[in-house]
Image: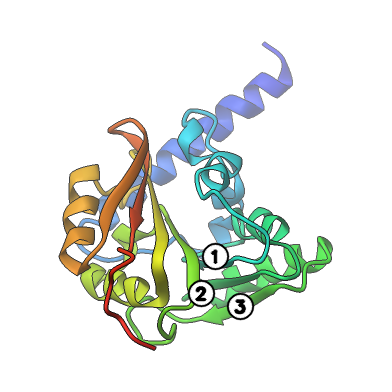
Amino acid sequence: MSFAAYVFLGLVGLTGLVAIIWRVASRRHSVPCPVWLRWLVELDNPFAKTNRAAVIVQHLDLQPGMAVLDVGCGPGRVTIPIAEQVGQQGEVVAMDIQAGMLHRAEEKARAANLTNIRFLQAAAGEGKLGRNHFDRSLLVTVLGEIPDREAALREIFDALKPGGILSVTEIIFDPHFQTRNTVARLARAVGFREKALHGSRVAFTLNLEKPHDSQQQN
């Protein structure tokens, strides 16, 4: 067996061990991915196409000039390609509760010469997002880390324009995995309606729409 194969198997084993420990710990506490593990978050999972950055971005149907909210952006794995697609006339708000994650995302934005990203250290549900501003929003393996999921989803709902889309991606390997039924139930409770489902029961992206007839006001 080649050295590269040993390295790959070692990384797979380490990833599995971290996932098991993380899942056990998260049964009693909300444990976001620590900053020192940001390298793991930056990798596309080789076993789940649904969770690859390019696939997640593809399902957003982005257009130049759009405003996009990346909640729990981490080190910017999807933030950067989104900012590139919406262009300089667009806007991306990269939101995370951990300063270390935001610093890494800022480094990547500078390296890519992107100036259309605003970085916000905050938690969803704190009332920092305003109303009727964003065309798209994302929660990529983040929803289960949020203590008050309903408050977070309600704030995101309010922050989206009527017709705006919230894209929720979940993968079974994540210790905070939320089932498709759980995501749909929580989303309906705050006013979202289902628009599209991509993937399978164990790795999926569920796109949720804020109805055009929503009466939310600025």
Which percent across, then down, holds residue 80?
68, 58
**Residue under the image location 69 percent in, 55 percent down:** 85
- In terms of secondary structure, where does tag 3 sit? strand
Within the image, what quadrant is residue 4 found in?
top right
**Residue under the image location 57 percent in, 57 percent down:** 38
Q: Earlier in the sequence, mark 2 or mark 1?
A: 1
Which percent across, then down, holds residue 160?
41, 71
Q: Nearer the viewer, residue 180 or 111?
A: 180
Asked if 143 appears above or below 161 in the picture, the reply is above
Q: Amino acid at mark 1?
A: Val
Quarter of the picture containing the C terminus is bottom left
- In terms of secondary structure, where does tag 1 sit? helix
User: Badge 1 is on which residue?
Assistant: 35
Is 5 placed left or right of 162 in the picture? Answer: right
Foreground mark, 3 or 2, reads: 3
Callout 2: 10 Å neighbours few (<14), some, many (20+)?
many
Q: Amino acid at mark 3?
A: Phe
Which percent across, then down, holds residue 2?
72, 15
Foreground mark, 2 or 1, reads: 2
Q: Earlier in the sequence, mark 3 or mark 2?
A: 2
Asked if 68 appears above or below 54 in the picture, the reply is below
Foreground mark, 1 or 3, reads: 3
Callout 1: 10 Å neighbours few (<14), some, many (20+)?
some
User: Badge 2 is on which residue?
Assistant: 98
- In terms of secondary structure, where does tag 2 sit? loop
User: Badge 3 is on which residue?
Assistant: 119
Q: Amino acid at mark 2?
A: Gln
